[in-house]
């Protein structure tokens, strides 16, 4: 304890001494003192170090010394990197890199500094997710190092390039660069930072699905530094071991490793590894079907990722959240996170990124043209195979659509047949009643026949209920099972769009991806239909203003045309006790309908207006009006039917208004189209002010039905027992 205290005291004394010298120092001497103050504080006080670095930079500018300007900029970037301010790191590094490039012939020492500046810029761009820029800077740094012939420096640069390829998920190429770096280390018998390369190798083996190789690499890394391993190495090593053991289905060992790594990450204030370890723990809990705990870890990771610049980690959070919500059957949240995952991933792995990467690698690897030609031939072959698979998948989508149409026709046929059957039963009952009046002597026999017919009708209704339940289950399972192939299709499309360079093929892939997204949206809405049919209604007093604000916020998140305005007004005497989920569904679909079909004319200011007032007998009236393109009059009566589309703009296959009607009916109300024209449409939803009496009535009817069902079951059993007794008697 006394040694540490003594060292700290000596450091403070030296800083105080330098500060006293700084008061009277000028020009180059002042710059040198500020540099020493930076070196004294950059390991302990990042903010103070940044302040000294900025003063040194401005001092160098004042004396016009290009070499010292570059050095001052490097010190600023060093401190900003410690503070996690990557965007500012990139700005200052690009500025001093430009100065170094312009003055390297005049000041040869700048070329040596340039390789470090390029390397630091590459790391900063990588953290921000700009992998093409990162790779470009690292390759330029490598060119300088290869020209100088410093093998140790070359090994460091190859390790950094491997990290970029790892981030790009080109794990084979990342592995190649890491192994080259490791070979140089072993050739030079250089053990400095050897454990970091072994850690990188282990992470890459994990990504390549080689957990045993990964475990060996991590253990070797920890053996290299032994008792002197830094917290950073222990953090990364434990995380990598946790991932490898989880791949080997050793969940408890993996959990221990992730928890240890998470503790170290929080101690080091390392947000990225905190997020990665939380994701690892969430995967373990999900594999054990502890979905609540899994979502808690993911929510914590999401909170950390939202406030950071680690885009890759945020992509993983969105992906894992979508998978977990799918398993909990929360398809709305699953779809939300899936959409965020796709958008964020597309924003990083864009076509421009792929083109830039290709250009950068081509400029650097011209000497490998023959190998590139061979790889291109293999890529063309792979693309042809992918196109063939995509054609098969497209055929499958068409087949599924045809099956859905057939299912709809079967439902229509079954409905008509049920009407005919009911009409026949009504006619039979009428005939029986007339015969009862005419033939009193056969009254007992006719009563018996009426009872038989009534029993048949009850059995038919029970059968119909069972068939409807089975049909709902079929729609649910079919929609759910199709989600997996659709997600796979979108994934294949995304990967193909990264690999395919042909513009026509890119266009086909984008259209196929868009079609898959639309079909995915339709399947999601079908699942919502099933959910509305089976949801257990929960009555509560609803804050309509809060509900509308949530719906508008959700629509803004999805995207609202910039000129479109949404207004609402609620009468002060309106009181609504109902199910908040179904009420929000009604509002969301009607407002979304107005947004989708808004008028794009520049002469019109589009709007959607919601007005809620109190109706007769305590009912609540919800009016939703827009000045959009309107609905054809021939569609007015059919617009609330399933799969009826009022316009080609509809992206959900005519399900939104059907859901509105279904939710309204479940709440004991209804919806209708009051008026429509080319100047807009106006809908009215009428809901009971208090749904509790309706719920009580429905419950009583259901209990009565169950009692009647049990009664008839007992009668059926008694008749069967009586017939058996008669046969024994005979």
Image (tube, rainbow, N blue to C red):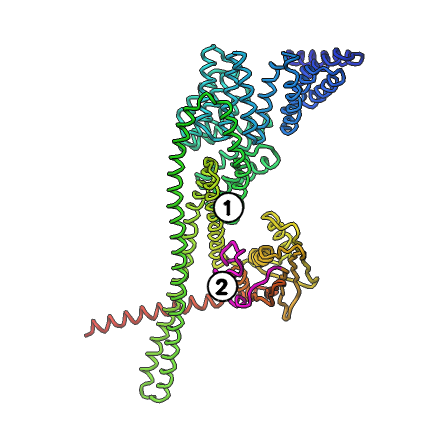
Q: Quadrant of the C terminus?
A: bottom left
Q: Is residue 302 above or below residue 139?
A: below
Of labels 2 and 1, earlier in sequence is 1
Report which quarter residue 416 is drawn in.
bottom left
Q: Position of residue 380 (x, y in %)?
A: 40, 34
Residue at image coords 37%, 38%:
385
367 versus 576 height, above or below: above
Question: How many C-alpha atoms fall within 10 Å of the one at disc 1: few (<14), some, or many (≥20)?
Answer: many
**Residue 77 located left or right of residue 294:** right
Q: Is residue 646 magenta?
A: yes
Residue at the spot 38% in from the left edge and 35% down from the top edge: 381
- The chief SS type of the magenta part is loop
**Stretch of the chain drawn in magenta:** 628-657
Q: Which residue is mark 1?
A: 334
Residue 505 picture location, percent across and down: 45, 41
Q: Secondary structure at mark 1?
A: helix
| Kind of element beneath mark 2 | loop
Farthest residue to the right: give it. Answer: 24
In this rendering, position of residue 149 left or right of residue 34: left
- In this view, the residue in front, 445 or 135, is 135
Work out which quarter of the rendered image holds the N terminus and state it. Answer: top right
Q: Where is residue 250, by image quadrant?
A: top left
Count of marks placed on residues: 2
Magenta stretch containing residue 34, yes or no?
A: no
Q: Which residue is mark 2?
A: 641
**Residue in front for this viewpoint, 703 or 260:** 260
Label 2 CA crowd tier, 10 Å (few <14, some 14–19, many 20+): some
Which circle marks residue 280 in the picture? none
Which of pointers 2 and 1 indicates the residue nearer the eye? Answer: 2
Residue 629 is at least partly visible in this image: yes
Image coordinates for residue 421, horizontal then vertical, percent:
37, 73
């Amino acid at each position: 304890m006394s040694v540490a205290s003594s060292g700290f005291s000596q450091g403070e004394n030296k800083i105080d001494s330098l500060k006293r010298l700084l008061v009277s120092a000028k020009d180059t001497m002042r710059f040198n003192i500020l540099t020493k103050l930076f070196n004294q504080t950059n390991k302990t006080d990042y903010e103070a170090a940044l302040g000294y670095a900025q003063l040194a930079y401005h001092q160098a500018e004042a004396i016009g010394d290009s070499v010292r300007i570059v050095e001052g900029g490097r010190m600023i970037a060093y401190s900003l990197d410690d503070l996690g301010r990557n965007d500012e790191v990139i700005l200052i590094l690009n500025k001093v890199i430009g100065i170094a490039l312009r003055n390297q012939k005049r000041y040869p020492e700048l070329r040596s500094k340039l390789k470090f500046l390029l390397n630091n810029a590459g790391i900063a761009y990588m953290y921000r997710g700009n992998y093409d820029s990162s790779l470009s800077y690292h390759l330029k740094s490598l060119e300088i190092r290869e020209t100088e012939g410093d093998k140790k420096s070359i090994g460091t640069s190859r390790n950094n390039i491997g990290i970029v390829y790892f981030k790009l998920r080109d794990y084979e190429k990342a592995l190649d660069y890491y192994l080259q770096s490791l070979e140089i280390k072993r050739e030079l018998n250089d053990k400095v930072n050897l454990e970091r390369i072994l850690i990188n190798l282990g992470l890459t083996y994990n990504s390549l699905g080689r957990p045993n190789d990964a475990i060996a690499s991590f253990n070797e890394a920890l053996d290299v530094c032994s008792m002197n391993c830094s917290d950073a190495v222990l953090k990364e090593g434990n995380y990598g071991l946790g991932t490898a053991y989880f791949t080997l289905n050793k969940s408890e060992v993996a959990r221990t490793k992730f928890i240890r790594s998470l503790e170290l990450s929080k101690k080091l204030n390392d947000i990225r590894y905190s997020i990665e370890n939380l994701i690892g723990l969430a995967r373990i809990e999900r594999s054990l079907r502890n979905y609540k705990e899994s979502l808690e870890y993911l929510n914590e990771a999401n909170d950390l990722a939202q406030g950071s610049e680690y885009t890759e980690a945020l992509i993983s959070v969105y992906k894992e959240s979508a998978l977990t919500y799918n398993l909990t059957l929360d398809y709305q949240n699953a779809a939300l996170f899936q959409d965020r995952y796709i958008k964020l991933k597309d924003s990083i792995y864009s076509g421009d990124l792929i083109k830039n990467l290709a250009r950068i690698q081509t400029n650097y690897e011209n000497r490998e043209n023959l190998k590139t030609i061979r790889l291109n031939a293999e890529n063309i072959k792979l693309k042809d195979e992918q196109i063939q698979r995509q054609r098969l998948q497209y055929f499958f989508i068409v087949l599924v659509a045809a099956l859905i149409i057939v299912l709809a026709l079967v439902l229509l046929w079954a409905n008509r047949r049920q009407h005919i059957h009911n009409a026949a039963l009504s006619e039979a009952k009428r005939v029986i009643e007339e015969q009862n009046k005419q033939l009193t002597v056969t009254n007992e026999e006719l009563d018996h026949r009426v009872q038989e017919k009534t029993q048949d009708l009850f059995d038919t209704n029970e059968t119909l209920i069972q068939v409807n339940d089975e049909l709902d289950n079929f729609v649910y399972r079919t929609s759910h099972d199709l989600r997996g192939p659709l997600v796979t299709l979108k994934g294949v499309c995304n990967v193909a769009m990264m690999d395919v360079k042909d513009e026509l093929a890119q266009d086909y892939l984008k259209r196929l991806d868009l079609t898959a997204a639309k079909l995915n949206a339709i399947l999601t809405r079908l699942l919502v239909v099933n959910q509305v049919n089976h949801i257990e209604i929960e009555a509560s007093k609803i804050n309509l203003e809060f509900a509308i604000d949530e719906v508008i916020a959700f629509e803004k998140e999805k995207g609202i045309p910039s000129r479109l305005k949404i207004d609402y007004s609620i009468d002060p005497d309106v009181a609504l006790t109902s199910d908040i989920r179904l009420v929000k569904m009604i509002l969301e679909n009607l407002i979304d309908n107005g947004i989708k079909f808004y008028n794009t004319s520049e002469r019109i200011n589009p709007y959607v207006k919601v007005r809620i007032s109190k109706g007769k007998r305590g009912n609540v009236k919800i009016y939703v009006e827009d000045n959009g393109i309107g609905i054809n009059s021939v569609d007015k009566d059919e617009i609330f039917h399933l799969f009826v589309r009022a316009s080609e703009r509809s992206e959900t296959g005519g399900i939104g208004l059907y859901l509105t009607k279904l939710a309204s009916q479940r709440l004991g109300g209804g919806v209708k189209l009051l008026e429509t024209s080319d100047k807009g449409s106006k809908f009215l939803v009428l809901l009971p002010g208090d749904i509790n009496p309706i719920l009580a009535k429905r419950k009583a009817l259901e209990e009565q039905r169950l009692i009647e069902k049990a009664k008839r079951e007992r009668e059926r059993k008694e008749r069967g027992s009586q017939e058996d007794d008669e046969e024994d008697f005979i």
